[in-house]
Amino acid sequence: MLGCRDPEALARFWCEVLDFVVLDREEDGSLEIGPREGFGGPQPTIILSRRDEPEPGKPGLHIDVNATDRDQDAELERLLELGARPADIGQTGEESWHVLADPEGNEFCLLRTRLDPL
Protein backbone atom coordinates (compact mmCIF):
# COMPACT_ATOMS: atom_id res chain seq x y z
CA MET A 1 0.00 0.00 0.00
CA LEU A 2 1.16 3.50 -0.79
CA GLY A 3 -0.31 6.40 1.17
CA CYS A 4 -0.72 9.49 -1.00
CA ARG A 5 -2.54 12.83 -1.17
CA ASP A 6 -4.15 12.19 -4.58
CA PRO A 7 -4.72 8.49 -5.36
CA GLU A 8 -6.28 9.24 -8.77
CA ALA A 9 -3.30 11.29 -9.98
CA LEU A 10 -0.74 8.84 -8.62
CA ALA A 11 -2.67 5.93 -10.15
CA ARG A 12 -2.53 7.63 -13.57
CA PHE A 13 1.26 8.06 -13.21
CA TRP A 14 2.00 4.48 -12.07
CA CYS A 15 -0.46 2.95 -14.56
CA GLU A 16 1.43 4.68 -17.38
CA VAL A 17 4.84 3.71 -15.95
CA LEU A 18 3.94 0.05 -15.36
CA ASP A 19 1.30 -0.42 -18.09
CA PHE A 20 -1.24 -1.16 -15.34
CA VAL A 21 -4.94 -0.35 -15.08
CA VAL A 22 -7.21 0.54 -12.19
CA LEU A 23 -8.60 -2.77 -10.93
CA ASP A 24 -10.73 -1.53 -8.04
CA ARG A 25 -12.03 1.68 -6.46
CA GLU A 26 -13.17 1.86 -2.85
CA GLU A 27 -15.68 4.32 -1.35
CA ASP A 28 -12.89 5.91 0.75
CA GLY A 29 -11.05 6.94 -2.44
CA SER A 30 -8.47 4.13 -2.33
CA LEU A 31 -7.54 2.55 -5.66
CA GLU A 32 -5.93 -0.73 -6.56
CA ILE A 33 -3.89 -0.85 -9.73
CA GLY A 34 -2.44 -3.90 -11.41
CA PRO A 35 -1.80 -5.73 -14.67
CA ARG A 36 -4.27 -5.48 -17.53
CA GLU A 37 -4.95 -9.20 -17.18
CA GLY A 38 -6.49 -8.51 -13.77
CA PHE A 39 -6.15 -10.26 -10.46
CA GLY A 40 -4.62 -13.66 -9.89
CA GLY A 41 -1.52 -13.59 -12.08
CA PRO A 42 2.13 -13.45 -11.06
CA GLN A 43 2.36 -9.64 -11.15
CA PRO A 44 1.70 -7.66 -7.96
CA THR A 45 -0.94 -5.01 -7.50
CA ILE A 46 -0.49 -1.70 -5.69
CA ILE A 47 -3.09 -0.12 -3.41
CA LEU A 48 -3.03 3.68 -3.34
CA SER A 49 -4.69 4.95 -0.17
CA ARG A 50 -5.56 8.58 0.55
CA ARG A 51 -3.44 10.20 3.29
CA ASP A 52 -3.30 13.94 3.85
CA GLU A 53 0.07 13.60 5.59
CA PRO A 54 2.63 10.79 5.48
CA GLU A 55 2.54 8.43 8.44
CA PRO A 56 5.41 9.35 10.79
CA GLY A 57 8.24 6.85 10.73
CA LYS A 58 6.83 4.95 7.75
CA PRO A 59 8.89 5.03 4.57
CA GLY A 60 7.11 5.29 1.27
CA LEU A 61 7.08 2.41 -1.14
CA HIS A 62 10.28 2.10 -3.20
CA ILE A 63 9.92 0.50 -6.62
CA ASP A 64 12.73 -0.47 -8.99
CA VAL A 65 11.60 -0.07 -12.61
CA ASN A 66 13.13 -2.04 -15.46
CA ALA A 67 12.08 -1.28 -19.01
CA THR A 68 11.61 -4.42 -21.09
CA ASP A 69 10.83 -2.82 -24.45
CA ARG A 70 13.31 0.08 -24.67
CA ASP A 71 16.72 1.12 -23.44
CA GLN A 72 17.33 3.03 -20.21
CA ASP A 73 17.75 6.44 -21.89
CA ALA A 74 14.44 6.13 -23.75
CA GLU A 75 12.68 4.98 -20.58
CA LEU A 76 14.19 7.85 -18.58
CA GLU A 77 12.85 10.32 -21.13
CA ARG A 78 9.40 8.69 -21.01
CA LEU A 79 9.28 8.74 -17.20
CA LEU A 80 10.31 12.40 -17.04
CA GLU A 81 7.59 13.26 -19.59
CA LEU A 82 5.05 11.46 -17.38
CA GLY A 83 5.95 13.67 -14.42
CA ALA A 84 8.84 11.91 -12.69
CA ARG A 85 11.74 14.09 -11.60
CA PRO A 86 15.36 13.37 -10.67
CA ALA A 87 15.96 12.75 -6.96
CA ASP A 88 19.24 13.17 -5.13
CA ILE A 89 19.87 10.65 -2.37
CA GLY A 90 23.63 11.01 -2.38
CA GLN A 91 24.49 9.23 -5.61
CA THR A 92 28.06 9.49 -6.86
CA GLY A 93 27.12 9.74 -10.53
CA GLU A 94 28.78 6.41 -11.24
CA GLU A 95 25.65 4.33 -10.61
CA SER A 96 24.13 2.31 -13.42
CA TRP A 97 20.64 3.40 -12.33
CA HIS A 98 18.72 6.67 -12.03
CA VAL A 99 16.95 7.73 -8.84
CA LEU A 100 13.67 9.47 -9.60
CA ALA A 101 10.62 10.65 -7.68
CA ASP A 102 7.01 10.23 -8.72
CA PRO A 103 4.65 13.26 -8.71
CA GLU A 104 4.19 12.98 -4.91
CA GLY A 105 7.89 12.60 -4.16
CA ASN A 106 8.05 8.81 -3.67
CA GLU A 107 11.51 7.73 -4.79
CA PHE A 108 12.06 4.91 -7.22
CA CYS A 109 14.96 3.67 -9.33
CA LEU A 110 15.19 3.14 -13.05
CA LEU A 111 17.57 0.23 -13.55
CA ARG A 112 19.78 -0.16 -16.59
CA THR A 113 19.21 -3.80 -17.42
CA ARG A 114 16.39 -6.20 -16.94
CA LEU A 115 16.85 -8.56 -14.00
CA ASP A 116 16.38 -12.25 -14.66
CA PRO A 117 13.77 -13.90 -12.43
CA LEU A 118 15.13 -16.06 -9.64
Image (spheres, helix red, strand yellow):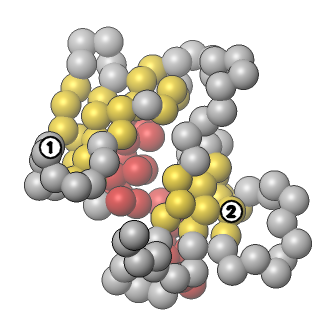
Q: Amino acid at mark 1?
A: Phe
Which residue position holds label 2?
99
On the image, the x and y values in percent for residue 15 come to 33, 52
Rendered image quadrant of residue 88: bottom right
Residue 94 in the figure: left or right of residue 53: right
On the image, the x and y values in percent for residue 118 come to 39, 70
For image coordinates 88% across by 72% down, the residue present is 92
The correct choice, above or below, for 30 with respect to 98 in the image is: above
For image coordinates 22% across by 55% down, the residue present is 42
Residue 116 in the figure: left or right of residue 19: right
The correct choice, above or below, for 61 with respect to 6 in the image is: below
On the image, the x and y values in percent for residue 19 come to 29, 61
Q: Amino acid at mark 2?
A: Val
Q: Nearer the viewer, residue 8 or 40?
A: 40
For image coordinates 46% across by 76% down, the residue present is 115
Q: Residue 67: in sight, yes or no? A: no
Disc tally is 2
Which mark is on residue 39?
1
